[in-house]
Amino acid sequence: MTATLSTILRPTRTESPAASLRIFTACWERIVRNFVHRAAIAQLREFDDDALRDIGLVRSGIEAAVRGVMTAPNRVRM
């Protein structure tokens, strides 16, 4: 039995154009967010240790702070 182009079933497209647009938008937003994070990390790395301490950071915590995974230390009231 031979198959011709007219007898081959093509898969039906289940995604709507809106779904494709949402996927593209989500990917684009992630790319932009990554560039923004990289720019912020680069700027913070230019600070000296005293300036970083003034804003509550240490050099090893720059990336965590920018990405939002750093927890705030408990502050003692005076």
Image (cartoon, helix red, strand yellow):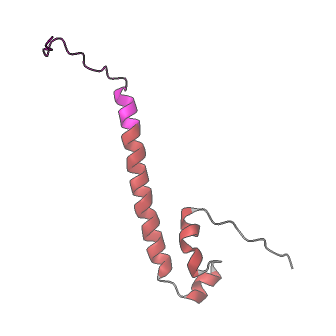
- The reply, left or right, for residue 13 in relation to residue 72 is left
* Horizontal arrangement in the rendering, residue 10 relative to residue 53 (left or right): left
- In the rendered image, which quarter contains the C terminus? bottom right
Residue 53 falls in which quadrant of the image?
bottom right
* Residue displayed at 29% across by 21% down: 11
Residue 71, image x and y in percent? 68, 65
Q: Residue furthest front?
A: 1
Q: How many marks?
A: 0
- Split into 4 quadrants, where in the image is the N terminus? top left
The structure residue drawn at horizontal position 40% and vertical position 56%, both measured from the top left corner, is 32
Tell me the residue at 46%/65% (across/down).
37
Give the prevailing secondary structure in the magenta stretch: loop
Q: Tell me which segment is drawn in magenta.
A: 1-22
Residue 5 or residue 53, whichever sits in front: 5
Outermost residue to the right: 78
Across and down, in percent, residue 14 comes to 37, 23
Dividing the picture into quadrants, the one containing residue 22 is top left
Residue sitting at 38 percent across and 30 percent down?
18
**4 shown above or below 69:** above
Using residue 73 as the reference point, say whether residue 5 is left or right of it: left
List x then y, in percent, for residue 10. Answer: 25, 19
- Whether residue 48 appears in magenta in the rendering, the answer is no
Please name whichever residue, 45 or 3, is drawn nearer the observer in this view of the structure: 3
User: Is residue 6 toward the left or the right of residue 43 in the image?
Assistant: left
Q: Say whether residue 8 is magenta.
A: yes
Residue 64 picture quarter? bottom right
